[in-house]
Image (spheres, coloured by chain):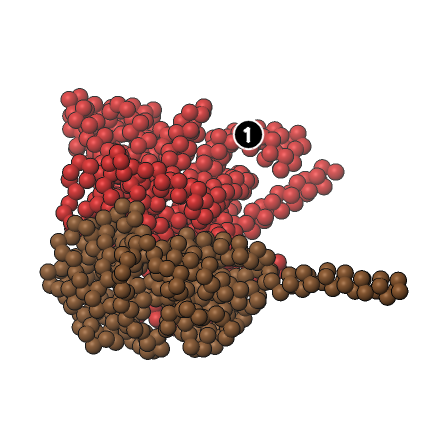
Amino acid sequence: MADTAGLRERAEETALLWVLVAIVAILSLVPLARLLFEGVAPGGRFSTAALSNVLSSATTWTAAQHSLVTACGGTALAVLIGATVAVLVALTDIRGRNAFVFCFVLPLMIAPQVVALAWLQLFGPSSTLLKMIGLAPAMGSRNPLYSAQGIILLLGVQYAPLVFLTLRAGLRTLPQELLEAGLAAGAKPPTILRTIVLPLMTPPLVAGIALCFVSCLGNFGIPAFLGIPGNYLVLPTLIYQRLAGLGPSVLSEVAVLSCLIGFIAVLGIFLQDLMLRRRDFRITTTSNAMRPFELARWRPAVEIALWILTIVVLVLPLVALLLSSLVPAAGVPLTAKSATWSNYDYVLFDHAAAKRALVNSFSLSATAAIVIVLVAVPLAYFLVWRRSRLLRVLNLAAEMPYALPGVVLAIAAILVFLKPLPVLGLTLYNTVWIILFGYLARFLVLGLRPVIGGYYQLDRTLEEAAQIAGARLLRRLATIILPLVAPMATAGALLVFLTAFNELTVSALLWSSGAETLGVVVFSFQQGGDSTYAAALAMLTVAVTIALMLSTLLTGKPARGVLPWRD
Amino acid sequence: MNYLLRGVLLAAALVSMLAPLSAQAQAPKGKLVLYTSQPERDATQTTAAFKQAYPGVEVEVFRSGTTEVMGKLAAEFAAGAPKADVLLIADAASMEALKKDGRLLPYPEARVAGLAAGTYDADRTYFGSKLITTGIAVNTAAKSRPASWADLAKPENKGQIAMPSPLYSGAAAIMLGTMTARPDLGWAFFEKLKADEAVAVRGNGAVLTAVASGEKPYGVLVDFMAFNAKAKGSPIEFIFPAEGVPAVTEPVAMLKTAQNPAAGRAFIDFILSDEGQKLALSMGYIPAKASVGMPSWLPPGTVIKLMPTDIGNVVQNNSANLKRFSELFGN
């Protein structure tokens, strides 16, 4: 009898495991495999026509070169800003740390296209803010952001928090004893930074660099707003223009371009791996967070510098965006008489697509968040407590749609769902469901990682006690494990919601009339010349994002290390 | 007597019941699928007004840029499953291309009386719904007011001109085809613009943003965009150049594969009717039927000098023109 119970138990576990494997395979492996297949065998027949067409076209290599230039430049700037701020926040005794971290991380949570729009409103001859303070440049002068330098600047500003977060997590594990030993031996702080901190922090730094590089490479919103008007194309915007202009007939060529981006991204990750493999970076001691560097008379100056950075990077562009959303039309100076709420009125109540987009974005993000958490909890159970090679491959497969640029996933999704589904005969293409699929595939890992972290903090004996008492797997998951990982799972769900709510890259290629998202509507407003409507809608998304982020600060126990803006 | 009388009364009753039924059967109903490249606001207003006139018809709209709409159509034709019944897109060149491929269903009984000559196809396959002209837009703070196309291309305006790229805008493509065919403008005009470092941006929307914000004080822009922005307070003015203006007519047409041809014909009737033309007028456009009036932003007494467009010629030379343009201005 015990045997059959044990067999049933194992059969149940195996069934659940294979269901999860199927889900991850459908979300991650099938689209990417279909993409690779389309690159070498367009339309089902093996041919290198698409491959040779794309690789021999000058436009491809110009765009690839632009991509590399902006990605490397953006990464360099992000590392410069992010690393400096991380060292200052983690290793010195500045005050107001939490508030500063919240403001510094905010650009990461706001959509890249909103960041681009805000900065565009800050510069240029018609900048409402500059006009108010009388510093507007002369008529006919070009907005300096419409250039490669502008793109690099905004990419650096957008992803500096990413480097900051990775490095700060690493700095927390830095053994304070080594730093104190260096200080006691009489070394000055710069020497300690150079000879102790930097070598030990190489893994998190390199991980941050790789993450930043891949994000810059795959970013669509910033080059779309700043590069398209001046015809400065990078690979994601080239794909967007090809697809938007010529429709599904160019899918095989676009698939090759996506594989090219994916290849460059994988190369970056591989280089990271290579750099870390040669030396041993293991740290054997850990200690509590003591801040060894006292700034003394430098402290006020450093704090002021950091807050000036925040004001320049965050506050000024957002204020410019707000002011632009209050003028009735582009180019009108903002005065007490001309200020109007009509843009918000129009966007919230009159414009059919904007209303649909609000509903769509909310429901798609919420659905994605809930479904991902429901999948992540059992999946993490197997990944953490049942080790096997298959599961490690599964983990890697779940990471790929997030690691690779968003356009790659979008093209892959189009290829998979263009024709109706085999058995059910439903077509997901050109509906909201293909966008939901894109979100599920891309953000699965965002919900999975916190839950895995939660499992590591659990004591397995609780679960084993329940198992001995005879509870089956699903029951254990629902009644014991879920309540214990709930804080981490909720944090993961919130992260998924915020990221999906603000994203543009995936939905720019998958949207259709009736299935718009907020990012798409802001983009099409700006492209159609309605920059005031774009500004109004963008401000609304920023308000929702900030409100959600602040609400997490009011709730009780923090899920440590999950939400980027909480210490 | 009673049987006869009863029989006649019954027959009369039946006939009187059937008459409204048959009238209702004649009124179009069901689903109408419209693919359009009008701005979102106009598409919503047009479909709402049409539904008021023909309450039995449920309209399903796909709205996007001209290239996207044509791309979607092409994909559907390739898959053998076109979904659209009627099209209302920006320019006659795309319609002409569809007509050549035999995709359009002629509507010989369409009421074209009163429509400006040249705005509808001679074979009655597509009909222009309004007149959208392309002229010169200037920021009110600009140094000069060019009175003609030749004035715009003067060397004094170097680095200060924005124009919509014909590679992305249907109206700009027609403008390119029309102007390059004229002896007084031709390709020399565009080469002068290039020498003036004119920027070809993606779409009329970007030109409006550039001119209204002051980045490029002079622009080539469609009339209604400039006037709508001006009405909201934007510092922009529109000038009809002396040589004349190229125009697009935003034609409406029905596909041969339309699933609901009765509703399609009703839609075309609506667009060409006085009601539909007055709707175009109220949305700020110059209507194709001059008898319904002129928009309020047009100074009374303005004579709009339309540049004649040989649409067949334009379509034939389109790809060669686009190629030459992209070589001149960069891709």
* Residue at horizontal 29 percent and vertical 26 percent from the top: A97
* Residue at horizontal 22 percent and vertical 38 percent from the top: A129
Q: Which chain is brown?
A: B
**Residue A11 as seen in the image, left or right of residue A203:** right
**Residue B49 as seen in the image, left or right of residue A105:** right
Badge 1 amino acid? Pro
Provide residue A497's location: percent of width, then percent of height: 45, 40
Work out which quarter of the rendered image holds the C terminus of chain B and state it.
bottom left
Q: Which residue is mark 1?
A: A483
Provide residue A535's location: percent of width, then percent of height: 32, 43
Q: Is residue B312 above or below residue A183?
A: below
Q: Which chain is red?
A: A
Provide residue B175's location: percent of width, then percent of height: 28, 68
Give the image quarter of residue A556.
Answer: top left
Q: Is residue B250 above or below residue B106?
A: above
* Chain bearing mark 1: A
Q: Is residue B78 above or below residue A258?
A: below
Work out which quarter of the rendered image holds the N terminus of chain B and state it.
bottom right
**Residue B153 as seen in the image, left or right of residue A166:** left
Q: Residue A178 versus residue A393: which sits nearer the camera?
A: A393
Residue B93 seen: yes
